[in-house]
Image: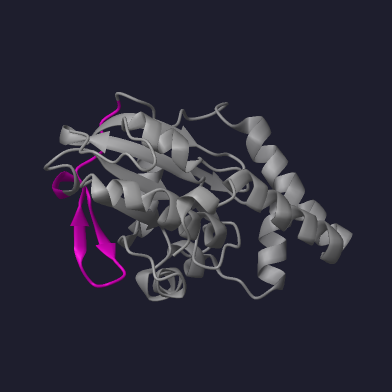
């Protein structure tokens, strides 16, 4: 595991990925990706409002990839918890973000006794790949049927070029979210909840290549890197 002091910001890592795509992808494929993200940025907040501080999450329990069940009430029984919503196990940006949080966010949370739960709608049989690939030390759980993501106003639907691109590659929506012919995923988000499942901090990223930096999450919890203390 890399020292958090030597880890580049997420924004820099995503820029490297974008530059690599600009060099290697066919222009038409790149345009589908770029245009979908631009549409999400443009339309963010125009329809259903996303989760915000003061909201109360529903009392759900989610199935983790290790076979356990994670209750939101149990997560906040002793204090705050951090929820990281991501798209799916094969998402290149998610494979940058989750190990980044492993190295830069989780150590301070663990030292302060604050749980972190990573959440995707992907079925557990496929979702487990990302936890294994990166040896994630925090639980990864599936949001079956997008129930929690939809309740929090996090989801978006693929535009037609993105859907056709996925189908052309042999993709099925069931492999992403467990739902037949429903091309819907959560926008990446980091949410801090406290006792009673009350939201203390929420940051939703309409562009999946621009996600919440760890420093912002730690600041919302009253923590600093290298100065861990329990945040009640």
Q: Quick check: 11 left or right of 177?
A: right
Residue 42 position within the rendered picture, expressed as x and y whole percent measured from the top left: 67, 31
Residue 220 position within the rendered picture, expressed as x and y whole percent measured from the top left: 36, 30
Most distant residue in the top direction: 54
Q: Quick check: 151 left or right of 68?
A: right
Q: Is residue 61 above or below residue 228?
A: below
Q: Is residue 204 above or below residue 36?
A: above
Q: What kind of colouring is applied to the model shown? A: one colour
Q: Residue at x 37, y 36 (%)?
A: 224
Residue 193 position within the rendered picture, expressed as x and y whole percent measured from the top left: 27, 36
Q: Quadrant of residue 226?
A: top left
Q: Closest to the observer: 135 or 93?
A: 135
Q: Does the magenta run of residues contain 70? A: yes
Q: Quadrant of residue 58?
A: top left
Q: Closest to the observer: 7 or 184?
A: 7
Residue 6 position within the rendered picture, expressed as x and y whole percent measured from the top left: 54, 52
Q: Residue at x 52, y 58 (%)?
A: 182
Q: Quick check: 114 left or right of 42?
A: left
- Quarter in which the C terminus is drawn: top left
- Range of residues picked out in magenta: 55-74
- State how many labels appear: 0
Q: Closest to the observer: 176 or 5?
A: 5
Query: Does any portion of residue 152 appear in the rendered image?
Result: no
Q: Residue at x 52, y 54 (%)?
A: 97
Q: Does the magenta run of residues contain 61? A: yes
- Quarter in which the N terminus is drawn: bottom left
């Amino acid at each position: 595991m890399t020292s958090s002091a030597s880890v580049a910001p997420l924004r820099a890592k995503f820029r490297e990925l974008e530059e690599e795509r600009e060099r290697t992808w066919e222009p038409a494929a790149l345009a589908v990706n770029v245009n979908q993200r631009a549409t999400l940025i443009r339309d963010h907040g125009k329809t259903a409002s996303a989760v915000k501080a003061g909201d109360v999450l529903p009392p759900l329990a989610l199935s983790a990839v290790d076979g356990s069940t994670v209750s939101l009430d149990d997560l906040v029984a002793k204090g705050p918890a951090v929820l990281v919503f991501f798209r799916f196990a094969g998402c290149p940006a998610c494979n940058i973000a989750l190990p980044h949080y492993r190295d830069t966010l989780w150590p301070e949370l663990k030292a302060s006794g604050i749980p972190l739960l990573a959440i995707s709608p992907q079925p557990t049989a496929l979702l487990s790949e990302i936890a294994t690939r990166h040896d994630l030390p925090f639980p990864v759980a599936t949001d079956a049927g997008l129930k929690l993501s939809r309740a929090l106003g996090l989801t978006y639907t693929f535009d037609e070029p993105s859907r056709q691109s996925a189908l052309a590659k042999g993709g099925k929506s069931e492999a992403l979210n467990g739902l037949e012919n429903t091309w819907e995923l959560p926008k990446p988000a980091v949410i801090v909840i406290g006792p009673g499942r009350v939201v203390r901090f929420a940051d939703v990223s309409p562009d999946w290549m621009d996600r919440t930096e760890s420093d912002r999450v730690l600041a919302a919890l009253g923590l600093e890197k290298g100065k861990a203390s329990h945040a009640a």
